[in-house]
Image: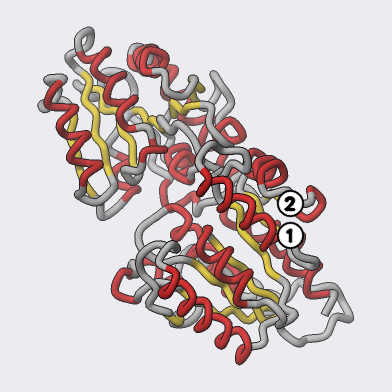
């Protein structure tokens, strides 16, 4: 039996009907990613702890791209609709929306919970006229209704218009995401519930970290995909500043597929003469093992983030964290307590923060312990799912 699973309980209010609330959960795909991992963990917790809900999973994408670990967490085999490509491929998009509409019509769920932009918008269109309320999970801070680019303006305004329908509710992964949705999508503040991202703490928790002097070289690490918003080039620039002053520090970059973005970053490393000091690991089999083998975790994001779960995972692994003040990072990390917060797009500030912690092993240990305490208290998968159940699913179910 999964150590993280607890026996099912029915903690509904006395006198409630035993009929299950039927929920269809819709997500873009189940490839490796922070939101996809969170989705699978939430479904496992929901299915194992709350029998008052029946859960069905629909994936817009293809089954062959699904990550086996995530599939194993789900309560049942998902329905894959086979969509691939971008939403701008209108024939493929409309086919997928039609498939989803037929599925929702047949399933007749009490509500549908969507995750990520394609799923949010496709679901909003597919359910028109079916009388099914939607919960949209606001996982980031994308979109600008006043952007210079016409496509960005159109996409942001259309998203808001589709989602602002009577009976819909919204779950934001951070207060920053909630505020962005209110300002850019014009979602009603009273319809947004903040349920901070949560993690299974014990999966990432490590024994007490070694004291000063136990490792000859300081290892800095980061893990994410290679999209522009992740800010890898600023981290590489910052490490370049440090490398000339500290020859006992290395940087390990995990995650992401091989492609143009990674090739460009590898070229940058070579031009800076850092090939022997910066290692690209690609996808790692175990994020927990990755955290266990580094001394300092860095999140150099420059925009769009809601609340990266990697911050929480690193905290659970007793790591001090250097983060940019983007999105909900500051809702998890308190500057000077669990880590250091620096401005985005500022390699010098990033380098200074890494240098400060690199030279202070006892401070790193203290921050790591503080991080573990904080994530255990405030950022567990149990707390996240409980908030969604108590403040979203149950109130919506009571209206049925």
Residue furthest toward the front?
150
Q: Residue at x 34, y 12 (%)?
A: 359
Q: Nearer the viewer, residue 362 or 186?
A: 186
Q: Is residue 229 left or right of residue 116?
A: left
Query: Does 275 appear above or below 391?
Result: above
Question: Where does the image place residue 58, in percent across and percent down from the top left?
Answer: 50, 77
Q: Is residue 276 visible?
A: yes
Local secondary structure at mark 1: loop
Q: Nearer the viewer, residue 8 or 355?
A: 355
Q: Residue at x 79, y 68 (%)?
A: 167
Would you call the spot at circle 2 few (<14 residues within 10 Å), some (14-19), or many (20 or more)? many
Would you call the spot at circle 1 few (<14 residues within 10 Å), some (14-19), or many (20 or more)? some
Residue located beneath label 1 in the image: 164
Question: Where does the image place residue 59, in percent across and percent down from the top left?
Answer: 46, 73
Q: Residue at x 24, y 34 (%)?
A: 252
Instruction: Give the position of the C terminus as an image quadrant.
Output: bottom right
Q: Is residue 378 visible?
A: no
Query: Does 100 appear above or below 312?
Result: below
Quadrant in the picture for residue 61: bottom left
Question: Where does the image place residue 196, in percent across and percent down from the top left?
Answer: 62, 47
Residue furthest toward the right?
15
Question: Where does the image place residue 113, in percent across and percent down from the top left?
Answer: 62, 68
Local secondary structure at mark 2: loop
Quadrant in the picture for residue 68: bottom left
Query: Does 31 appear above or below 187?
Result: below
Q: Nearer the viewer, residue 244 or 213?
A: 244
Labelled pair 2, 1 in contact (Cβ < 8 Å)? yes
Residue located beneath label 2 in the image: 187
Q: Residue at x 79, y 51 (%)?
A: 188
2 or 1: tag closer to the N-terminus: 1
């Amino acid at each position: 039996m999964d150590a993280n699973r607890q026996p099912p309980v029915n903690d509904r209010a006395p006198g409630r009907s035993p009929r299950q609330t039927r929920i269809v959960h819709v997500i873009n795909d189940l490839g490796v990613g922070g939101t996809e991992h969170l989705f699978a963990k939430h479904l496992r917790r929901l299915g194992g702890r709350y029998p008052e809900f029946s859960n069905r999973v629909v994936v817009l994408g293809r089954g062959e791209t699904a990550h086996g670990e995530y599939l194993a967490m789900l309560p049942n085999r998902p329905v894959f609709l086979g969509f691939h490509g971008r939403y701008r491929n209108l024939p493929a998009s409309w086919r997928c929306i039609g498939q989803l509409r037929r599925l929702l019509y047949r399933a007749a769920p009490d509500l549908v919970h969507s995750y990520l932009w394609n799923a949010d918008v496709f679901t909003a269109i597919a359910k028109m006229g079916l009388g099914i309320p939607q919960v949209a999970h606001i996982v980031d801070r994308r979109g600008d209704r006043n952007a210079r680019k016409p496509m960005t303006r159109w996409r942001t305004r259309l998203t808001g218009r589709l989602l602002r329908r009577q009976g819909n509710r919204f779950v934001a992964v951070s207060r920053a995401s909630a505020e962005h949705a209110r300002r850019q999508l014009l979602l009603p503040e009273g319809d947004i519930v903040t349920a901070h991202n949560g993690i299974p703490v014990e999966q990432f928790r490590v024994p007490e970290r070694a004291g000063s002097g136990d490792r000859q070289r300081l290892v800095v690490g980061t893990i994410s995909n290679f999209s522009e918003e992740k800010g890898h080039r600023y981290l590489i620039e910052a490490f370049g500043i440090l490398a000339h002053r500290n020859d006992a520090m290395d940087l390990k970059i995990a995650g992401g597929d091989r492609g143009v973005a990674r090739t460009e970053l590898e070229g940058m490393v070579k031009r800076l003469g850092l090939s022997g000091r910066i290692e690209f690991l690609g996808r790692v089999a175990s994020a927990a093992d990755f955290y266990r083998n580094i001394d300092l975790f860095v999140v150099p994001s420059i925009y769009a983030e809601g609340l990266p779960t990697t911050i929480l995972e690193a905290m659970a692994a007793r790591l001090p964290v250097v983060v940019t003040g983007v999105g909900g990072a500051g809702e998890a990390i308190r500057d000077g307590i669990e880590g250091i917060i620096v401005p985005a797009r500022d390699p010098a500030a990033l380098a200074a923060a890494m240098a400060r912690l690199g030279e202070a092993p006892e401070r790193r240990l203290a921050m790591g312990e503080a991080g573990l305490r904080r994530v255990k208290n405030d950022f567990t998968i149990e707390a996240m799912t409980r908030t969604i159940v108590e403040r979203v699913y149950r109130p919506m179910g009571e209206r049925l």
